[in-house]
Image: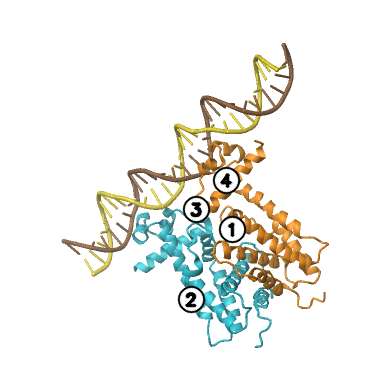
Chain colours: A cyan, B orange, C yellow, D brown
Amino acid sequence: MPIADKKKAIFESTLELVKENGFHGTPMSLVAKKAGVAAGTIYHYFESKEVLILELYHYIQQQSIEVLKREDRADIPFQKCFFNLWHGLYTYYSKNTGIFRFFEQFVNSPYNTGQSEFVKDDFHRLLFQFFERGIQEGHLRPISSKILGTLAHSNIISTVKIQVLGGLKLQNGELEQIPLILWDGMQNRNDKS
Amino acid sequence: MPIADKKKAIFESTLELVKENGFHGTPMSLVAKKAGVAAGTIYHYFESKEVLILELYHYIQQQSIEVLKREDRADIPFQKCFFNLWHGLYTYYSKNTGIFRFFEQFVNSPYNTGQSEFVKDDFHRLLFQFFERGIQEGHLRPISSKILGTLAHSNIISTVKIQVLGGLKLQNGELEQIPLILWDGMQNRNDKS
DNA sequence: TTTGCTTAATTGAACGTTCATTCGGTTTGC
DNA sequence: GCAAACCGAATGAACGTTCAATTAAGCAAA
C-alpha cells in the first residue's frame, strides 16, 4: 500500500470516529484499529494526535476547495455561479456528513487556535474572492466580501444542519427557496443588470 | 453562601475555562479551584461532569430565553420586533463571549446527543413561534418557521463569530446592514402592509 | 442562651481508568 | 543486508470520581 493510501486510511478512520463519538471519544487506539494498523504506526505518519487532526483538517479543506474552484467560473454569469456554488457546497456537505461534523467540531475547538482564519485559510480566501467579484460587478451590496462570504457559508451550513442534526425533512421546493432568500438579501437593489 | 450561589460559582468557573481551553482542557480539578471549592464538593451539586455540562447548558439557555421574551411583543409591529430581537441576541452574545463559545462547542459535541433540539428545546420553541407570527401576519415568506428561525439565528451567530473568532472589526454601518440583508431575504414580496 | 444531637456541606488525598506516546524488536521492500 | 515501515505491549501522566474524615448548620430540650 502506498504511503498516501495509508495516510488516507487513517484519515477516513479518524473522520468516521469523530463523527460518531466526537474528538474526546476518539482515542488513537481506536483510530488504529479501524484503520487496520498498529497504534505505533500512526506515529510514523503523524507526530502527534494534534498534528493528525490538523492535517486532516487540511486534507478535508482541499475537497471543499475543489467544489469552490469547480463552480467559480469567470465565463458564467455571477448569479448562476452563486446558485451553483450554493448547491455544490450544500450537496458536498450533505453527502459527507462525517466531514461536515468534523468541520463544525474543529472550528469551535482549541485545535483551531484562533489563527485568524480570515487570512491564512485557502478556502476562505477563495470564498471571499468569489464574493468580491459579485460586488465588483455590482450584483451584490457593497459590503465587505468577508462578511458576505461568511454569512453565505453559514447559511449553507445551517441548511445542512437542519436536516442532519435537526432531523427535519425539507418539503418540496423549500430547499430551492433557501439560496433564494440569501440571494434576495445580499443582492444590490441598484443593480441594473 | 446559599446553594444557588455556589452552583452559580461552579457554572461561571466552568464557563470561563471552557471558553479558554475547550471541553477537554477543562478538568474538574480546575473548575473546583477556580470556583474556590474542593473537587469533591462539585459532586454534591452535580452527579457527574456530564450532568454539570448539561445543567450549565440549561442555565445559559434561560438567559437567551429572557432576551427572546423581552423582544417578542405582540403589541409591537413584527418588523420592529424582528430587528429588536436580532440586535438583542447579537448584543447578548457579544457581551458574553464565554456563553457564546460554550454554546457553539456544546451543540457540536457528543454531550448534545441528537435529542432533536427542534422539539424539546424551549429556546427554539419560542424562536420558531416568533417566526410563525411573521408568517401568519404575511410579513415573511411562507416557509417553515423552523427553517426561517434556524437561518436567522445562525445569521446572528455568524455575525458574532466574524468579530470574536475572525478578528474582523465591522465598519460603521456594516453591523446595521446585516439584519437588513436577512430581512430583505426572508420578507414576503407580496406583503401589502 | 447554652447544650447536645443530627444532618448536610465540605475537604483533598487516594483510586482506578483511560489514553497519548514510546520503544525494542520484527517484518517488508529493495 | 540495510533501511524504512510496522507492530503492540509497556509507560506514565492526566483526569473523573470516591470516600473517610472534618466542619458547619439546624434545631429541640434544658
Looking at the rendered structure, the kind of residue marked 3 is His
Q: Is residue B119 left or right of residue A3?
A: right
Please indicate, yes or no, whether residue A1 appears anywhere in the rendered image: no
Pointers 4 and 2 within a single chain:
no
How far apart are the two marked residues, 2 and 3, measured between alpha carbons?
Answer: 30 Å
Give the chain letter at badge 2.
Answer: A
Pointers 2 and 3 within a single chain:
yes
Label 4 sits on residue: B13
- Quick one: quadrant of the N terminus of chain B? top right
Label 1 sits on residue: B104
Please indicate, yes or no, whether residue A101 appears anywhere in the rendered image: yes
Which residue is farthest front? B172
Looking at the rendered structure, the kind of residue marked 2 is Glu
How far apart are the two marked residues, 4 and 2, measured between alpha carbons?
Answer: 43 Å
Label 2 sits on residue: A66
Give the chain letter at badge 1.
Answer: B
